[in-house]
Amino acid sequence: WMNKENNLMILAYGQTGTGKTHTVLGNIGCRSSEQRGLLPRIIEGLFDELEAAKEAAGDTEKKTSLQISYLEIFNEQIHDLLVPPKAGVSREALQVRYHPILGVMINDLSQSSVSNIEEAMELVEFGTRMRSIASTSMNSRSSRAHTVFTFRFEQTSDSGETQMAQVQLVDLAGREQEKSSSDNKDRLKERQFINTSLFHLSTCIINLSKKGKKVNASDFGFRNSRLTLLLANSLTGNSRTGMIAAVSPASSDSDETISTLRFAEQVKNIKTKATSNRVNKADVVKQLQDQIAQLKLDMEKNLRAGSGSSEQVAQLEAVCSHFKDALEQEKSRSQALAEERAECLKEMGLSV
């Protein structure tokens, strides 16, 4: 995977209570082989592959970066699960935007550097504790948000060329039957957001599965929800994408089971093409700086376009700053966040 510089995504879809989260995470407190979920197994496999690649290449000159991000989409707001919450302060809602060159970008999403399996699993366990979970009439531990875990690999040579690859594991909140109305107002509001975002995802999947119809990540349909915009790249282009269909054996859930299987059949018809990811960050930064300079000139020439262009300038400057960050600066921020997470767990009475 890393040698091919490909992007991978696995999507867990199905009715609430069918075991999607258990399939993805397993028993998160037990790391034995029998109790592990898909995510811990993938992380172990990635580190084994990286170690084997290092031994085979014997190359110590390249700078290698392994980064993890973990987010949730709760009521159409994106929250960073690796940033400890502050008492009395609402979680910061992150903004997601689409850039024609760089694809989907999430402003201020933390990228935590890791160097071994233990550090990676600590992030998984912390992020899992921060997830939005509540009891509903259909599931005693229902995920109230979609979660996206991303493992990113970057390796930069002395020439400045960067080899990139990433693995994404998406645990979708389960679709809930509209006829179930015994939940309180908060649960009903969450259910509405969940079902609406899944509806938009289904619409995008149907359009993508139609033969002869070309759909790009920048198309308007992907902008109908945060979920579809986040998944746009993986569903339309440079990614090897797979899906886990979780269904219930209960006869009372037969309608939802059939719906999930039909959705899976449509997903099978989507064709993506994974390509090698190699960029020169210095060239990307220069290209972004040129765009910023041009936008500033446009603002001076046309004051009426000032508000829109100023927002674009801010977005591009944020992206440019991200690409200019050195690897050591990323590690320094990761260390600061790690200390905050340890303090957060201590306040919760949980072991670090």
Image (cartoon, rainbow, N blue to C red):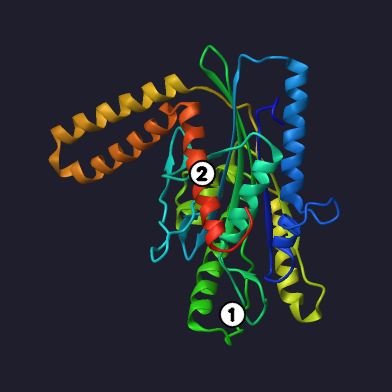
Residue on which the image places disc 1: 178
Q: Which mark is residue 79?
A: none
Of residues 149 and 225, the one nearer the viewer is: 149
Label 1: how many Cα within 10 Å (few below 14, some 14–19, many 20+)? few
SS for callout 1: loop
Of residues 312 and 320, the one nearer the viewer is: 320
Q: Position of residue 271 (x, y in %)?
A: 67, 42
At a point 70% along the width and 40% down the height, the residue shown is 117
Residue type, label 2: Ala
At a point 78% along the width and 71% down the height, the residue shown is 248
* Quarter where residue 113 is shown: top right
Q: Specify the farthest residue to the top.
A: 159
Label 2: how many Cα within 10 Å (few below 14, some 14–19, many 20+)? many
Q: Earlier in the sequence, mark 1 or mark 2?
A: 1
Residue type, label 1: Glu
Does any portion of residue 193 appear in the rendered image?
Answer: yes
At a point 75% along the width and 27% down the height, the residue shown is 51
* Picture layout, residue 81 above or below residue 285: below
Q: Position of residue 310 (x, y in %)?
A: 24, 41
282 on left or right of 176: left
Of residues 235 and 190, the one nearer the viewer is: 190
Q: Which mark is residue 217?
A: 2
Q: Position of residue 36 (x, y in %)?
A: 79, 53
297 on left or right of 97: left
Classify the position of the N terminus by image quarter. Answer: top right
Label 1 – label 2 distance at C-alpha = 30 Å
* Quarter where residue 101 is shown: top left
* Picture layout, residue 196 above or below residue 54: below
